[in-house]
Amino acid sequence: MDNFLNNIVAGDALELIPQLEEDSIHCCISDIPYGIGLDDWDVLHSNTNSALLGQSPAQQGKSGFKRRGKPIRGWSAADRSIPREYQEWCFQWGSLLYPKLKDGASLFIFGARRTLHRAIVALEDSGFLLKDILAWEKPNAHHRAQRISIVLSRRGLKVDAEKWSGWRLGNLAPIWEPIAWFFKPYPYTITDTVLVNEVGAMNIDAIQSGGKQPKNLIKSWFDQEEERWHEAQKPVSLLEFLIKLSTREQQIILDPFSGSGSTAVACERLGRQFIAFEINEEYVQIGKSRLSATWEHIESFQETIPKQFTMFENNKL
């Protein structure tokens, strides 16, 4: 396990998680695949419908409509089995993960509003208990609802187009995303768990804003200088909120689906140790480059302050 620590490891989480030591992880934070067909890595079912990951003529050349997921019509048994297959996939890695976390440790997963319930059931079946569902509020969101009057007009149905003026096809603007907060059951009281495993409590002082108590609605977005490497990337500040909420310095945080490495970057900035797995080699290299840049910034900052005040001194890769 030592070769995993403070490293982004290329490989399948289903193969790498079993190599971790049991009762060794203080927290798991991961932006897991949502199972909604966002990209090839997000197709977690056996449905091979030709519309999957395609584009309609109206979507071509528009960045906000890079791909369309398979239309949700439920016209075939394969369509209806997609959520169940996603749940089975979540149960696979959840069952492997469960013994690796310390009793009382938190598990945070990002998810889609449409499929998160399946992940919750799978992780509960794996042994975890659901503590809460947090809401991450974004400052803006793509509105992908198409005017049905335009569709009807193109078909030459002018009367129907007038009848349905003002109506759209699609969803409301997705301004928030859910974060499911689980914990691993503990055999003692929560206070004893905190004393023995140093997990299970919340560091409210670390996440207060303007002296106000934090809520389960988190407003966060990317910093101006924060580059976007991954289409599902989360802001580092959002991950820092979860890390500060649930862990202490030097504790080990696992991200089994690390994408472009944002969780690892947040850990480095906050003096936590991390283990990150990512199946896509290109994203592994991007994550490692981001870590190198983080360390260059930290070391530059360290030169301006006395070493006794440096929380990162003993936590280099």
Image: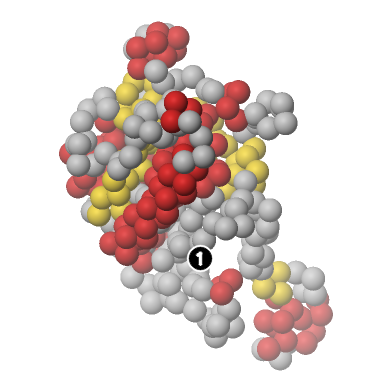
Please state which of residues 294 and 190 is positioned toward the viewer in this rendering. Answer: 294
Residue 220, horizontal then vertical, whole percent? 62, 46
What residue lies at 50% left-to-right and 65% top-to-bottom?
73
Image quarter (top left, top right, bottom left or bottom right) of the C terminus: top left
Q: Which quarter of the figure has residue 186?
A: top left
What residue lies at 54% left-to-right and 50% top-to-bottom?
235
Q: In this view, does 103 lie to the left or right of 16?
A: right
Residue 138, horizontal then vertical, whole percent? 64, 51
What residue lies at 65% left-to-right and 60% top-to-bottom?
141
- Measured along the vertical axis of the image, is residue 38 above or below residue 212? below
Tell me the residue that label 1 is attached to. 73
Image quarter (top left, top right, bottom left or bottom right) of the N terminus: top left
Residue 32, horizontal then vertical, whole percent? 40, 49
Please state which of residues 244 and 144 is positioned toward the viewer in this rendering. Answer: 244
Of the residues shown, which amino acid type is indicated by label 1?
Answer: Arg
Q: Is residue 2 left or right of residue 111?
A: left
Residue 114, horizontal then vertical, whole percent? 52, 51
Q: Is residue 287 visible?
A: no
- Measured along the vertical axis of the image, is residue 223 above or below residue 168? above
- Colour setup of the view: secondary structure
